[in-house]
Image: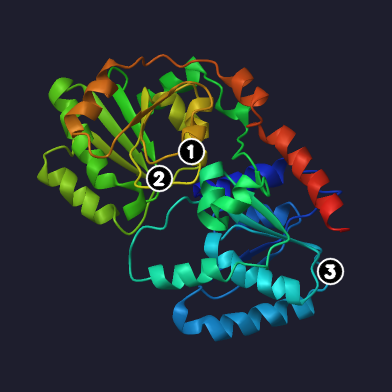
Amino acid sequence: MNRGGLETMLMNYYRQSDRSRVQFDFMVHRSAEGHYDREIERLGGRIYRMPQIRPGNYRRYFRLLDAFFREHPEYRVVHSHINENSSFVLRAAKKAGVPCRIAHSHLSDLGVDWKLPFRLYARYAMKGQPSEYFACSEKAGEWLFGRERSARKQVKVLNNAVNVKEFQFDEAVREALRAELGIEDRRVIGHIGRFNKQKNHSFLIDIFQAVRQKDPNTVLLLAGDGDLRPAMESKVRQLGLQDSVRFLGVRSDIPQLMQAMDVFLFPSLFEGLPVVLVEAQAAGLQCIVSDTITRETDVTGRVKFLGLNDSPAVWAEHIVSCSTEHADTSGQLQARGYDTQTMAAWLTDYYLQAKSM
């Protein structure tokens, strides 16, 4: 439970839920403590640790899952957020007689790597295991559960909601953070995301280089961490951009950080419906994103979609020409069901009804 988009969304729901009616416990697949672990425990939740899901330890993992549900017959709802690997968890839950078994899709593609055959196997194994099908977008639902199930309206789209009030624009916060970062008089492009292949940081840096050619007074803020961060730091040095690119690491002040930005840049190779783009819109930012991301992401009319085959110069032109004014989008987000307070109440009622099925 680190500060990723999915994990942050789950925490948004958990904080806003009525814990006298429903309590969340978490099964994670890492032995190290996550950023949110202590808060979860303060709120009354338990954390169970399982090994990472790897093809070489499937049998051991299946045995551990079966043993877990035998030892914990109290669970009536299992809500799995691990995409295609949800099939394994929900198989064990079904075997143990858990009545409500939710598979939740958060991606619309997997990319291609050595794990792809195993992921396709896991997706195939999904059939018959869930009792309910959730997705963060229609596209994500089609990808994991198939077009036929989606067409029959058997997939519920649960919005990746955020705490809208937390992101509302505050000029004083903006000025203080820009002063802290030493970027008071500069155009600020922002990106928040883990340094992995999916987030496409190499292309993002190419875009920023093109922006700098049009406006040298621009700075790029990169929040997040991951395996590819050293390679991206090296690329920034090779391009001579080190004075204009700030690697901020994992941040706990994302709502405040977004106040300091002028434009949000997100050229991912694929996504489901990224929470961070909802957050950026809640902060009133203009967002320039790849057209691989579902149009459902544009909740406020402040998202511009561009092709990954478009040149960095084309992206740069849109960035330097867009408005840097932060709009008040709170009403739009609340009306469209992207506020956690409203959606947490809906989810609590859903759990209570479904557990008795």
Question: Which residue corresponds to mark 3?
Answer: 74
Q: How crowded is mark 1: few (under 14 residues within 10 Å), some or many (20 or more)?
A: many
Color scheme of the displayed model: rainbow
Q: Which is nearer the eye, 299 or 144?
A: 144
Residue 11 lies, in percent from the top left, at: 63, 47
Question: Which residue corresponds to mark 1?
Answer: 276
Q: In the figure, 111 relative to 255: above or below?
A: below
Q: Is mark 3 on a helix, strand or loop?
A: loop
**2 and 3 marks in contact (CB < 8 Å):** no
Mark number displayed over residue 193: 2
**Mark 2 and mark 3: span between their CA atoms?**
36 Å
Disc 2 marks which amino acid? Gly
Q: Residues within 10 Å of mark 3 (few under 14, many from 20)?
A: few
User: Looking at the rendering, which quadrant does residue 46 occupy?
Assistant: bottom right
**Mark 3 and mark 1: span between their CA atoms?**
34 Å
Mark number displayed over residue 216: none
Point 50% across, 83% down: residue: 57
Point 80% across, 47% down: residue: 350
Residue 206 lies, in percent from the top left, at: 19, 38
Q: Which sits earlier in the primary sequence, circle 3 or circle 1?
A: 3
Q: Which sits earlier in the primary sequence, circle 1 or circle 2?
A: 2
Q: Is mark 2 on a helix, strand or loop?
A: loop
Residue 202 lies, in percent from the top left, at: 23, 46
Q: Which is nearer the eye, 41 or 348?
A: 348
In this rendering, would 203 be left or right of 259? left
Q: Which sits earlier in the primary sequence, circle 2 or circle 3?
A: 3
In this rendering, would 99 be left or right of 165? right
Disc 1 marks which amino acid? Val
Q: What element carries label 1?
A: helix
